[in-house]
Amino acid sequence: MDKQAQMAEREARQQIIDANWVGPIWSPLVDEPLLEMCMDLGVPKSPIILMPELRFKFFLMRLLEFFERPGKVMVVDATNARFEILRENAQSVGVNLYFSTQDVAQLNYSDNIFHLILTEIGLSTLVRLDDVLASYRRVLRPAGHLVFSAPIQGTFPQFFDIFDECLFKINPNASRAQKDLFADVMYPESIVEIIEQNGFELKEQRMAELVLNFQSAEQLLFSSLVESHYLGYCLNMYAPGVDYKLLLTNLVRAFHHYFQGESVSVPMRVGIFSAEKI
């Protein structure tokens, strides 16, 4: 099987998993509140919207239902793996949908371009939130809005326990540093403080608690949510002396070992934030 066929098979598997075990629970508790916040902002009827690191197709489609004629929708990510799939879903809508491969902490857009930035922040972005928010603020128009969700303390505890065990075997010092880093950034109060330090005024804050139930470790690991927001963190670490691919390999093996033949319940805690550029 060639690489393109493998990617298509993987995407098909992820679609099934997301549609059955992630979307129906995640969407009403996280995505819908994010979109409701957007609708309460009074943005123009044809806004220019930035959607960094978009993972879920139903999130994009629901946004397009809210903004029937957006001026432009930009989707940016460090990789372009999902762009074609997202583009296919938007073809029938006829919106101005654009894709760009770039680092969200170093956006190449001019200043004061976007009316709204809407995103679901994963771990790899959360741990460098200062740099990312500074980048977002620069490209937002005056009084532009940033609406996002982020994992907060107490979410997906199995991941952090197994992650720490695997990282400790590779580099004990890096393990301790990661614990401290997560402790610093994953409390809602810490996120709010970073928001306000970067020239935003917090307008609204909510919290969502939910449980995702997977029938196997494989379903868990193949879900877009876990792959992008948690496993993807291993490939975006900045700790010296860590073999990231080895860490990711060990992490996947550990999940299969711990949950082999068992269903997996994953408690999630998600902070939802709306802020205005000042």
Image (cartoon, rainbow, N blue to C red):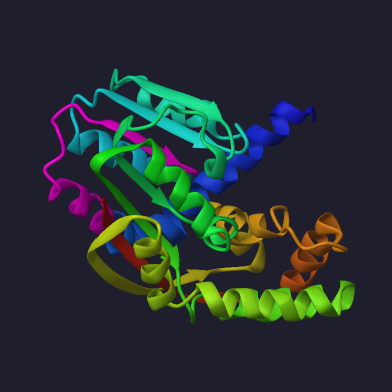
Does residue 41 show up magenta in the picture?
yes
- Residues rendered magenta in the picture: 32-54
Name the one closer to the observer, 260 or 65. Answer: 65
Quadrant position of residue 170: bottom right
- The residue at 83%/62% (across/down) is 240
Report whether residue 194 is seen. yes
Across and down, in percent, residue 54 comes to 46, 43
* Residue 261 visible from this viewpoint: no
Where's the N terminus, which quadrant?
top right
179 relative position to 215: left or right: right
Q: Is residue 27 above or below residue 65?
A: below
Tell me: 84 left or right of 2: left
Identity of the residue drawn at 33% across and 19% down: 96
Residue drawn 50% across and 58% down? Answer: 130
Observer-nearest of 185 and 72:
185
Q: Nearer the viewer, residue 272 or 256?
A: 272
Counting labels gives 0
Residue 175, percent from left and from top: 76, 77
Is 105 on the left-hand or right-hand side of 176? left
Say if 168 sits above or below 142 in the image: below
Query: Which residue occupies 69% across, 74% down?
Result: 178
Q: Left or right: 67 with respect to 213?
A: left
Coordinates of residue 5 in the picture (x, y in percent): 70, 29
